[in-house]
Image: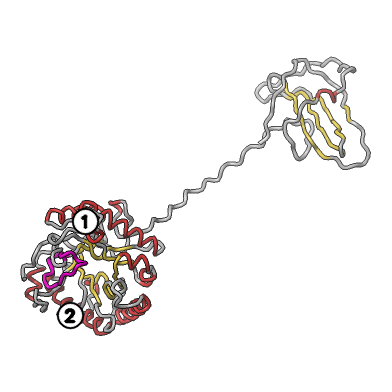
Amino acid sequence: MIEHKYHKHRREQVVVTEVVTAIESATYQLEDIIVYVDDKNLPVSTTIVYKDGANFIEHSQILPPSSTAAAPRQAPTPPPAPASTPVAEQSLKALAPYHRPKPALVLKPPSKPSPKIIPPAKPSPPPTHGGGGGKGVASGGPGFTSGVTYTPYNADNSCKTESQVAQDLADVNSYQVIRLYGTDCNQVANVIQGTKGRVSIFAGIFDINDILNEVNAIATAVDNNWKLINTVSVGNELVNNGAASVAQIISAIGTARSALKAKGYNGPVVTVDTMMAMKANPQLCRASDFCAINCHAFFDGNVSAGDAGLFVAEWARKVSQAAGGKTTVVTESGWPTRGNQNNKAIPSPEKHQQAMQSLNASFSENLVLYGLYNDLWKKDSGATHGAEKYWGIRGNAPSH
């Protein structure tokens, strides 16, 4: 942008014979065009300064009085120009360089081009990790707002009957999804029957060495009604436990996905592992349709029940970040009601309630609580702090 400084002159206007420094054939470089105006900002004269090598040559011209469209006026006859003052002496400091000389024109700063209005770019979505938008966590994944785990075993490890499963699941309408871990005990069909199809199933292939038979069991149970299946998992914590390698799990996911597709299922297929195993091996996430982690704040030992939700949400974020922003669904998280204290983590009914409230506050979707009832068939070890059996939200199952 060229800036102009207006220099005031007396109102008397002077006609001066044009003075041009004579030049021979040469190439000149335009240095400045200087326009003088009176106190009403009307042009009085112009001076054009050329550069010939190291020399400067000025070309000055007195302009006739200008007229305005609003009020034309007759210019008075100017007095003779004084001969003692060369026109070249009227030049002042150059205001700014210009590219092409236009004598006898009032130069105005070039108008700024109208700014091109570019709509703001849509922000990239933040990495999704199993929470809902209402909790400040981006949504994604299989899209359920409530889920819970269920196992169909009696305390002696025997299979529960169809009627026992129906008794356990008679009033589970508050959950959208029930997660199962395998296909034994005819559990997929029994859960579908026990819930009257009101709840979707997060089905599980437990044995990755028997994938085709487990896929057939799921397909038989749904009887081509694949809307009953929310997701199918392949293996549970197998890499964390050292029962399978990452390469074996990835191969098993591919085998299961192909077999399920052949049966008519096109929904999500994943593997489930601990948050630490999944973060350390993000290729498990990439092979899955979303990251699926079991994450329990209780076992950390440095987290109180009231902070369980924040702990789990942070791990979900870390896993998603490791997997390039892929959605992470928490497929197990809870708090025991009985057992031994693990540093800051205290098992009790009261702490269990605090942990449930914290988890629900941190996640509005894609969280599976662990579990619906106590698993009295399980066995404790030193690593489970005597709490392995007592994670049930509703205590002991009605059919126990």
Q: Is residue 164 left or right of residue 176?
A: left
Q: Residue at x 75, y 15 (%)?
A: 10
Q: Amino acid at mark 2?
A: Asp
Which residue is disc 1 drawn over?
Answer: 343
Could you say which is closer to the camera, residue 136 or residue 14? 136
Q: Earlier in the sequence, mark 1 or mark 2?
A: 2
In the picture provided, is 53 more to the left or to the right than 246?
A: right
Name the mark on residue 64. none
Residue 238 in percent (x, y) is at 29, 74
Q: Is residue 6 visible?
A: yes
Q: Is residue 373 magenta?
A: yes
Count how many numbered circles sit on residues in the image.
2
Q: Which residue is mark 2?
A: 184
Q: Quadrant of the N terminus?
A: top right
Q: Is residue 332 above or below residue 343?
A: below
Would you place residue 71 above or below residue 305 in this image? above
The answer to which of 391 and 229 lies nearer the viewer is: 391
Please name whichever residue, 255 or 16, is drawn nearer the observer in this view of the structure. 255
Task: Indicate the position of residue 18 as horizontal and vertical percent values.
Answer: 87, 26
> Mark 1 and mark 2: span between their CA atoms?
37 Å
What's the residue at 22%, 75% (across, down)? 225
Q: Which residues are magenta?
A: 371-387
**Callout 1, which amino acid?**
Asn
Local crowd size for mark 2, using a 10 Å CA cut-off: few (<14), some (14–19), many (≥20): few
Q: Residue 377's image quarter?
A: bottom left
In-image side of 21 versus 305 (left or right)? right
Secondary element at tag 2? helix
Q: Provide residue 90's location: percent of width, then percent of height.
A: 81, 23
